[in-house]
Structure formats: C-alpha cells, structure tokens
Image (spheres, rainbow, N blue to C red):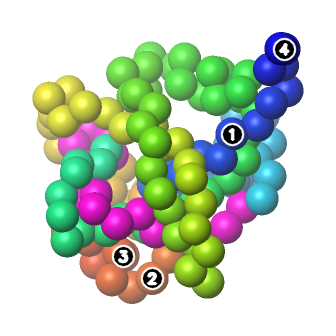
Amino acid sequence: MNDEGASRTIFFYGLFMDPDVLGEKEVEPSNFRLAVVDGYGLRIGARATLERVEGERVFGSLMDLKEEDLNFLYSEASVADYAPVQVTAFGMDGERFEAVSYILPMERLSGRNPEYARALLSVAEKLGIPEEHLEVIGSWI
C-alpha cells in the first residue's frame, strides 16, 4: 500500500502549534483544534519538549498533516532529534483523539532560551490556550 499523501493527527505543543508558522514553511495542516494531553509537562531548554509526569498536563493543538509534510518539518537540524510518541489528546470539548507528538528525549534537552519561551507564549495567547498553561510557559521566560 502506498502512503503517499496519507495524513496523521499530530499534537503540537511548541511553535509548530500555530498553523501560520506551518504555513510559512509551506506546510498546510487541516482539522486544527486546541487540545490537552494529560500526564506530560512542558519543558523548555533551547527548544520545547514534553516530559512524562503524572499530574501535569500540556495544552497545544491537534492538526492533520500529510506524511511528507511531517518528514519535511522534522528533517530540519534543529528538530531532527525529536521522536514520534503516541499520545491521547482531548479537544476542548472533551473529545478523545489518538495522536502522535514529536518529543525531544529529556537527555537531549539543554540550555535556556527565554526568547523561544516568549515566542511560544505569544503563539499560545494568539491561539487562546487556557490561562493555566500560559502561566506554565511564562515560568520559562
């Protein structure tokens, strides 16, 4: 079977959660919706990642992307170490989605990047991410 053009549901929690950022890269997502994943916490070093932590949650967006667009996005050197992880996300209406999220292994997280955190906070505010998560992002500035 040929998967050319097949789409996957992706949970984004970093700058890629903004469809406009993806559009600047000539990637066209579909089915955008805000979502939350429980059992993970946001961590920001040079870039953002998720860490498995009971009792924490991370907000972001769900989008459907073509396989070739995903390969293109994650071929950039700055995100090449991110690995796909299966997650269960919930839309803001409570609808359940099985999705993939690209996560940087914690041992690869390094540095500090307040500029990235500021940019992420701006994107999260623009998208209407809940205040509780804006505070989490702000704590990394």
Residue 3, above or below 64: above
Q: Quadrant of residue 61?
A: bottom right
Q: Earlier in the sequence, mark 2 or mark 1?
A: 1
Count neighbours of disc 4 (C-alpha within 10 A) and say few if under 14, some if 14 to 19, many if 20 or more.
few
Q: Nearer the viewer, mark 3 or mark 2?
A: 2
Which of the two discs, 4 and 3, labels the residue nearer the N terminus?
A: 4
User: As displayed, is residue 113 above or below residue 25?
Assistant: below
Q: Amino acid at mark 2?
A: Pro
**Any part of residue 113 in sight:** no
* Mark carried by residue 8: 1
Discs 2, 1 touching: Cβ within 8 Å = no
Residue, disc 3: 134
The x and y percentages for residue 47 are 32, 40
Principal SS element in the magenta part?
Answer: strand
- From mark 1 to mark 4, how far is it between C-alphas? 14 Å
Q: The C terminus lies in which quarter of the figure?
A: bottom left
Of circles 4 and 3, the one toward us is 4
Q: Amino acid at mark 3?
A: Leu
Number of callouts = 4
Q: Is residue 12 something one can see in this rendering?
A: yes
Q: Residue at x 59, y 60 (%)?
A: 97
Label 4 secondary element: loop
Viewer-closest of 85 and 109: 85
Closer to the eye: label 3 or 1: 1
Q: Amino acid at mark 4?
A: Asn
Gap between marks 2 and 1, in whole Å?
Answer: 25 Å
* Residue denoted by label 2: 130
- Magenta residues, start to end: 32-48
- At label 1, which amino acid type do we have? Arg
Q: Are marks 4 and 3 in contact (CB under 8 Å)?
A: no
